[in-house]
Amino acid sequence: MTRADRRPREVPTASRAGPRFTEKLAQAHLWVAVLAFGIASAMALMQALSRASLDLPWRTAGMYYLSVTAHGVLMALVFTTFFIMAFGYVVVSRTLSREPAPRVLAWTGYWLALTGTLATTGTILSGKASVLYTFYPPLMAHPLFYIGLALVVVGSWCWSAVMLLSYRAWRRANPDAPTPLAMHGMIATVIVWLIATVGVAAEDLIQLIPWSLGLVPTIDPVLARMLFWYFGHPLVYFWLLPAYVIWYTLLPRVAGGKLFSDPLARLVFVLFILLSAPVGFHHQFMDPGVSAGWKMVHTFLTFAILFPSFITAFTVTASMEVGGRAKGATGLFDWIAKLPWRDPLFSSIALSMILFAIGGIGGAINASFGMNAVVHNTAFIQGHFHLTVGSAVALTFMGAAYYLLPRLSGRELELGLLARVQPYLWFVGMMLFSISNHMTGLMGMPRRIYDASYGGSAAAAAWRGLTGISAVGGVFLFVSAGFFMLVMIGTALAGRRREPEPILWAEPLSPEITRRTVFDRYALWTAIAILLVIVAYAYPLWAHLRMARFGSPGFSPF
Amino acid sequence: MSDQPMGQHPKGTLLLVGLYGLLFAASWFAVYVFVYLRRGGVTP
């Protein structure tokens, strides 16, 4: 087999006879993601204005918590998961040169996840599940909320199976070829997801569903939180890894350069397989029921997982520098000006990286065992995760949607000016929103309160101006989200039909990996990851289960 | 597009990453000293 044979080949993306299977499947997922994003964005505006104490029509605590739940679930669980599933199918099709298979399983996963999404969203919007996206018991939701979430997870497992089966079929035909980098990243995503969802599936099926159906009278909230955060932090990497795939495999090409180091990129994804899961206790530093020693172990592991993100920051920025220098830059920083800042994919990613870099600083503060006490459950936390999932992930996915939709639908991107402006509006809005929330958090303002004025107390007056800045940021973000929706819907309805352009993956600068390497030994990495999970969780879980435990009945305040 | 200009050392990136590292450490210590220690640590 020659080197050229081993390289992933481009396959035709559409034909006059109608969309191919992958295009249809990926677009079905993409549109669920886009619609969920649109609803969630409307909810977000209301929250930002409410926290600035603006007396909006229908503003009540009940409506606020309904909207926070809808925003969190639709944005963090539905938008992300459906986009990632869509992108995964595109990666299979375009890097392995084969359709995702088995098709029945792929569609089964889609319909299960969609049915679950509708059930969960229905219970939230009807006011029967204002339990926030973390659904901590003893807050109790309607059983359909939990059953719907279970269906979303099962649907995502079908997707995971299709991804792995498609890879296995390709591997049998290409025993010595290196896994294409984009597929390597998506396999890492699947492995992280499968390990992580064991926790939420156990919480949902063993605790929440029987409890919400009245089959058991009480629930153990400490155990539920332990299981949730076992899932909840690797969930962050389930969001982040596909964004990194886009940064590593699409951005360098769009920037006019090459990927600075292919092996470093592969190493990053392997490190995420290993280190994503055994870190959940850093969300529970203030919780009883987990010993300080185990929290410290998770602190060290959390700092360890900063390392692959630092490698990513270096490699992707160096790839951009490569692009700028290829266009003639010779100075220290003049390559930055030569980058394609008017390209919405490029600007989305570059701006999301800047926001993510700021978010990384806050993340180190969150992860510090002692310092966590000054930011825990404050507005600092929402300021932080809007820079990570709300920027590094969401803004990258929006930029990628501009890139992918024309290539999947065979329609030209409509309203290109809005697409060019939208990432900058998001950047400005997110800076205003997140920086002000970091500051108010350090001043002690709690998160998840619908009225930050506390009835006019002196302490609350100190952060009043900053909540106003946060609200202005929310307006920018809402307008930006509106532009994104207009571009997507405009492209689908009115985009001029044309032969779709191919998806062009970045080539590595050097060295190019031409044979299968240790990075492709996914069974080994998965086994080590599971071992680390056992080391980090087995004893604390066992210690908790052997204690005298007290259950709680359910509460539904709204 | 030749590989020659691409293969240069990414000195701009190294400087940016270095500056970010300084900002990262300075910000962490600023919160540690001016917020955490000023309020009094949570441990005895």
Image (cartoon, rainbow, N blue to C red):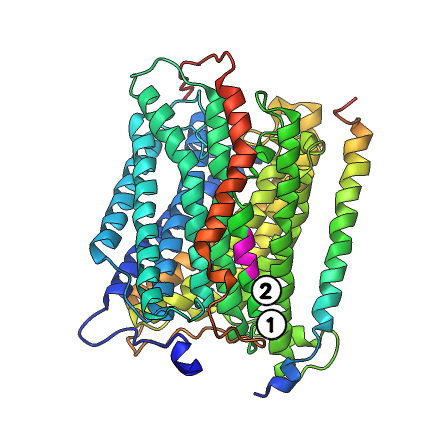
Does A414 appear in magenta? Answer: no
Residue A245: % across, % down: 49, 61
Q: Amino acid at mark 2?
A: Leu
Which quadrant holds the C terminus of chain A?
A: top left
Residue at point 48%, 69% (across, down): A250
Residue that numbered label 2 is attached to? A264
Q: Are marks 1 and 2 in contact (CB under 8 Å)?
A: yes
Residue that numbered label 1 is attached to? A260
Please identify the quarter of the rendering in which residue A338 is found. bottom right
Q: What are the residue bounds of the magenta stretch?
A: A267-271
Residue A503: % across, % down: 40, 73
| Overall secondary structure of the magenta section | helix
Q: Comparing marks 1 and 2, which lies closer to the viewer? A: 2
Residue at point 70%, 68% (across, down): B13
Q: Residue furthest left?
A: A17
Please identify the quarter of the rendering in which residue A15 is found. bottom left
Residue A527 vs A542, above or below: the answer is below
| Secondary element at image label 2 | helix
Residue at point 56%, 58% (across, down): A268
Q: Residues within 10 Å of mark 2 (few under 14, many from 20)?
A: some
Residue A435 vs A333, above or below: the answer is above
Residue A30: % across, % down: 34, 57
Residue A290 vs B16, above or below: the answer is above
| Secondary element at image label 1 | loop
- Whether callout 1 and callout 2 share a subunit is answered yes
Residue A20: tell me if it is visible.
yes
Residue A168: % across, % down: 33, 60
Q: Amino acid at mark 1?
A: Phe
